Amino acid sequence: MDSVSLSSLSSLTTYQKSSLEKGGYRSLSDLLLSTPSDISRTSRIAPLEVTRILEAACRERATPINKIKDLPPEGEEKFTTGDAELDGMLGGGIRTGMLWEVVGESAAGKTQLALQLSLLVQLPSRLGGVLGSAFYLTVASQLQTTRMEQILNTHPLLSPSLCSFANIQHASVPTIEKLIFVLSKSLPQYISVNDQNSSSRPLKLIVIDAIAELFHTSKRTTTQFLVERSRRLSEIGTLLHSLASKHQIAVLVLNEVSDTIDRDTAPLDSGQIGYKDQFRWFGRADILGAGRKEATLGLVWSNQLNVRIFLSRTSRRRYLEECERPRKFQESISATSSDNSAGDQEPVLIRRLTVVFSSVCDPASCDYVVTAEGISVIPGSAVLLAVRPAVGIAAPPGSAHVSTSPHGDLTQMRNAQVAPLDIGHVVDSTAVDSRHSTPDNEPGDDEWDAFWEQNALPECVFEEAANLTEPS
């Protein structure tokens, strides 16, 4: 608007332009940002004539109104996760133009999924891809190229002829300032140059691994720190949404979890919902006891997201039936253990995936396993989640009560739309230190807690150590 000169407007007469110029109005912005009374006084034009001038200028420079049906479709482009069951849960796959978050415990499979998607986005449309490229941003770790190469060589949809590391750009963003610089300066410039190169694939996926690491601090958490963190998160979210919507890019952000701490809070007025109850809806996979962990960064960050996917470690194993085994997982088992009977097979470590909220699909949950090929959903385990009642509000009389006990009749739980994630499980009694570390059994916080509970030192040891250190 600043570059539009009043002399270029054909709807104004020569006398009107001359009078306005004498009053100091040379551009359209000068005219529109002044009140009619000021224009009339400084240009010595009658108020009624000023009104006519403003109407004529606005009419000439007005943008035509488009109908919604005539607007180009946005956000309909999507690519596969490599698993048909998971695609169905997510509304057809990973949709571009949106901000996705994958949150979960250590060794739950967050990075596995991010590496998998960085390769699958490169597939042609006939295989569920978009012939795109990826930009992988790491905060405190390095890009796991060895694991990515393993997925590339073993996943049934992927092959070196279709996917290449050359289509995955990587940058390290160890500080908040560097991440903001990359999102606001470096990435827009890269996209502009990349779009001008006809031989380059368009950028369709941005991964941040992992955002919570930017806000780790050893200092005491104060109100000032939380306010500053909220401001930075809002700034990062705005930049990510701008890139996603303007260039039709899927943004995948990995996040961490923290332990759930239930504190006694002051009673609220009728109709009000406290922070704790809000976060049970938007920050936890609060089904079948999975609400002991919650996503970090609070509701400020949650409000930036279009989709939140929660990955959980169940610390349980199951003997999978043949019909429950993912196709590629079943083939790998039969290739390596063709001479073993079904009774000799070891139970498989089960993890849980929950869509906490989404703008393109319903909340749902499923069981999955992590293999050399990546993440695979156990066929038939995906179920829609029943709507969770508001915490602290009694259920209306006559309403059905849905039991969330992990035991009981499987058919009854399916009909109640509660995920049968732990039905028929066996406790993982295999010692952690007796298994080789694989993506399937990486030790996590729960395993170490259980170890120290069983091997805690007696109090007398600490008393003797304290006596030895005291000056004589």
Image: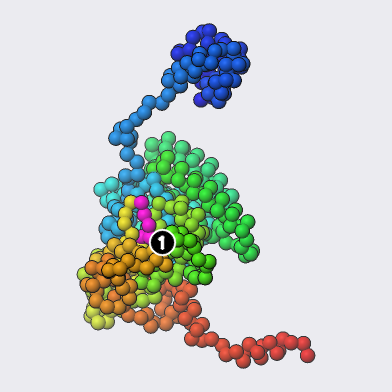
Q: Residues within 10 Å of mark 1 (few under 14, many from 20)?
A: some
Is 42 rendered above or below residue 315? Answer: above
Magenta residues: mostly which secondary structure?
A: strand
Q: Give me the residue at 46% from left, 43% from top.
A: 242
Q: Amino acid at mark 1?
A: Trp
The residue labelled by disc 1 is 281
Farthest right residue in view: 472
Is 427 rendered above or below residue 102? Answer: below
Residue stretch in magenta: 355-359
Is label 1 in a helix, a strand or a loop?
Answer: helix
Q: Is residue 37 magenta?
A: no
Of 114 and 197, nearer the camera is: 114
Q: Give me the residue at 36% from left, 60% from top.
A: 355
Q: Give me the residue at 28% from left, 47% from top.
A: 125
Residue 422 visible somewhere in the drawing: no
Q: Is residue 44 left or right of residue 252?
A: right
Of 3 and 372, nearer the camera is: 3
Q: Give me the residue at 38% from left, 60% from top.
A: 356
Is 398 rendered above or below residue 241? Answer: below
